[in-house]
Amino acid sequence: MFVVESESPATIEAVEAELGDARFSLVVVPRRPPLTKPKALNFALPVARGELVVVFDAEDVPDRQQLRNAASLFAQRPDIDCLQAELLIANADRSWTAALFASEYAGHFGVLLPAVARAGLPVPLGGTSNHLRRSALVEVGGWDGFNVTEDADLGVRLARFGKRTECFAAWTVEEAPEREKAWLKQRTRWMKGWMQTFIVHNRRPRQFLADIGWRNFLAFQIFVGGMFVSIGMHGIFLVMVLARMIANLVSDGIVDAWTYAHLVTLVLSYMGPVAVSAIGLARVGRSDLAPWLVLMPVYWLMGWVAVARAAFELIVRPFHWDKTAHFGLTLGPADPGTGRPAWRYWLAQSMRAIQSISEGLKRRGV
């Protein structure tokens, strides 16, 4: 089922060309606020007929067995209501931001989220490749049409309703933003959505605590709140330490002990995310990207700017959805070596990436 907004006539035309295949259908979403992805999903949900629902973004390339494996797991495990596949980046070699984005994803979806799921804590879902029982999705009210990071919110609501989420061994290849401007726009939306999720679920803290229990309540505050609070605090702390260090050098010619202690604190704060990313990269056979992790402080500073922009947007335009450009940004109109359309070239690259990663995981017994 292709869910397309009415303001995208070229996409509608492309989908209509494929509707001769009975497996495909088109849902055109009318232009009514809020203009968000979750609103579009909710509009299409009533006409979804299957027992299972999965969301893929238009640029995604899932591995060939993902749907089959998810359906089999649901059949074997009636206690599971949601399955999250692993997201991988196909264009990690094309820029430093894409390399760090791929490293971040490798740690988040390959190491951190599976650990959270195994611990039975609320799992903030990724925006794609999450498979759900339709009955559970309807019971929790579908997606929050006003949340610009509807995936994270849905994962928390599933936990509030006592639904179980697990990660499973399946992969979906995506395209990372390669330019800083595109990355910043996307990350601003994500941070704004995490702020929305944090505020919405904490608006009635007693009810939230009763729904989810102390353990999950604290995990939510740390994991969801920490997502934007830690990056915001990091930027302020880094600027203060650098300013103090410059002031020391200008006035005394040396750096005092307190400034050294602060620098050590900064280095230690980077070690955790760097270690998680490095483990994730090794797991998927992309340790060649690990040297880029030395730029983590710069990457976090960009995140600081995104948090500041998100806080501003949360006040002035909370439901604005800044769309991320794909395909053309990365590959241009065609692969210059073959003249093939960009989407065919990227699809071939993605399938090769899936095959390489799958072979690497099998060698490691994953």
Image (cartoon, rainbow, N blue to C red):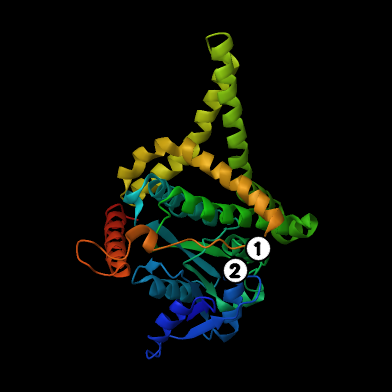
Q: Where is residue 333 in the image (x, y as percent from the top left)?
A: 31, 65
Q: Is 36 on the left or on the right of 170, as rendered?
A: right
Q: Do the residues labelled 2 and 1 touch (CB within 8 Å)?
A: yes
Helix, strand or loop at label 2? It is loop
Residue 37 is labelled as none
Q: Disc 1 designates what residue?
A: 319
Q: How far apart are marks 2 and 1 (CA)?
A: 7 Å
Q: Disc 2 designates what residue?
A: 36
Can residue 139 be seen here? The reply is: yes
Mark 2 nearby-residue class (10 Å; few <14, some 14–19, many ≥20)? many
Q: Where is residue 113 in the image (x, y as percent from the top left)?
A: 50, 54
The type of residue carrying mark 2 is Thr
Asked which quadrant contains residue 168, the reply is: bottom left
Q: Is 43 on the left or on the right of 69, as rendered?
A: right
Q: Is 21 on the left or on the right of 40, as rendered?
A: left
Residue drawn at x 57%, y 55% as measured from the top left: 190
Q: In this view, does 97 lie above or below 200?
A: above
Q: Where is residue 361 in the image (x, y as percent from the top left)?
A: 31, 55
Q: Position of residue 265 (x, y in %)?
A: 55, 27
Helix, strand or loop at label 1? It is loop
Q: Is residue 155 above or below residue 223?
A: below
Task: Depth check: give the residue in front, 99 or 134.
Answer: 99
Residue drawn at x 37%, y 40% as measured from the top left: 292
Task: Depth check: give the residue in front, 165 or 88.
Answer: 88
Can residue 198 be seen here? The reply is: no
Nearest to N terminus: mark 2 or mark 1 = 2
